[in-house]
Amino acid sequence: MIGIGGLGHMGIMWASKLNDASAEVTAISHNSNKKEAALKLGATKFLDTSDEKAVKEHARYFDYILCTANGKGQDYANWMSIIKLDGTFCTVGIPEAPISFGAFSVIGARASFTGSLIGSRKEIEDMLKFVDEHPELPPLSRSCPWRRSTRASRSSATERCASAWCSRTPPLEWRRLLRLKAESESFQHAV
């Protein structure tokens, strides 16, 4: 999971419940400021991309990376170096600047680069069912009573995270992850 913020927090919590809570979930950030929070949310590992040695140790490591980051200066070329052969990089964050990386970083890994905004009604129903099956996850509903509130008035981090999740959920990607879980017990390195 790249982007440890509102949507990223929720993504870590959700991904940690995949594969009967045995999926390896790595939180990825450009510094270690959010390491403790990411591990508390359910990440099993943390990768600080400012640590060149750690990035090299994770070269071609991850099956799937979900990116929720949306700031300027994102290092997509670096991120593409940690995708496993035939892996997938999915962005749901909408960056402020155009995405840029060399074509060989995708071609060399036979990687898929994809994006997602929202899924079908069935995929949203599957997502809500997943939440019902995991009571430790923050509750979600079909309506978001805080959606109209301003960011400053939201009282808790969980509420801010749930608000981001409710308004920008990528259920299509979660359905794909759940399908991968069902199809393959070898799906070990979810990010």
Image: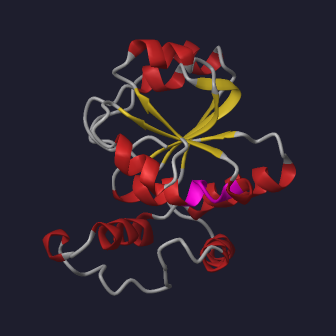
| Residue at 36 percent of width and 65 percent of height | 161
Q: From the top left corner, tell me how far across and down residue 99 is, in percent.
A: 39, 31
Residue 20 against residue 51 in the figure, above or below = below
Q: From the top left corner, tell me how far across and down residue 162 is, in percent.
A: 39, 71
Q: From the top left corner, tell me how far across and down residue 125 is, in percent.
A: 65, 78
Please give the count of numbered marks on the rendered protein.
Answer: 0
Q: Is residue 89 left or right of residue 40?
A: right
Q: From the top left corner, tell me how far across and down residue 141 is, in percent.
A: 49, 84
| Residue at 35 percent of width and 69 percent of height | 158
Quarter placement of the C terminus: top right
Q: Is residue 186 magenta?
A: no
**Res. 4 visible in picture:** no
**Coloration of the structure image:** secondary structure
Residue 3 against residue 127 in the figure, above or below = above
Could you tell me what secondary structure mostly forms the magenta stretch?
helix
Q: Is residue 184 left or right of residue 166?
A: right
Q: Is residue 130 left or right of residue 66?
A: right
- Residue stretch in magenta: 14-18
Residue 2 against residue 87 in the figure, above or below = below
Give the farthest residue toward the left: 152
| Residue at 69 percent of width and 75 percent of height | 122
**Res. 70 visible in picture:** yes
Q: Quadrant of residue 65?
A: top right
Front residue of 117 and 22:
22
| Residue at 63 percent of width and 80 percent of height | 132
Residue 61 against residue 160 in the figure, above or below = above
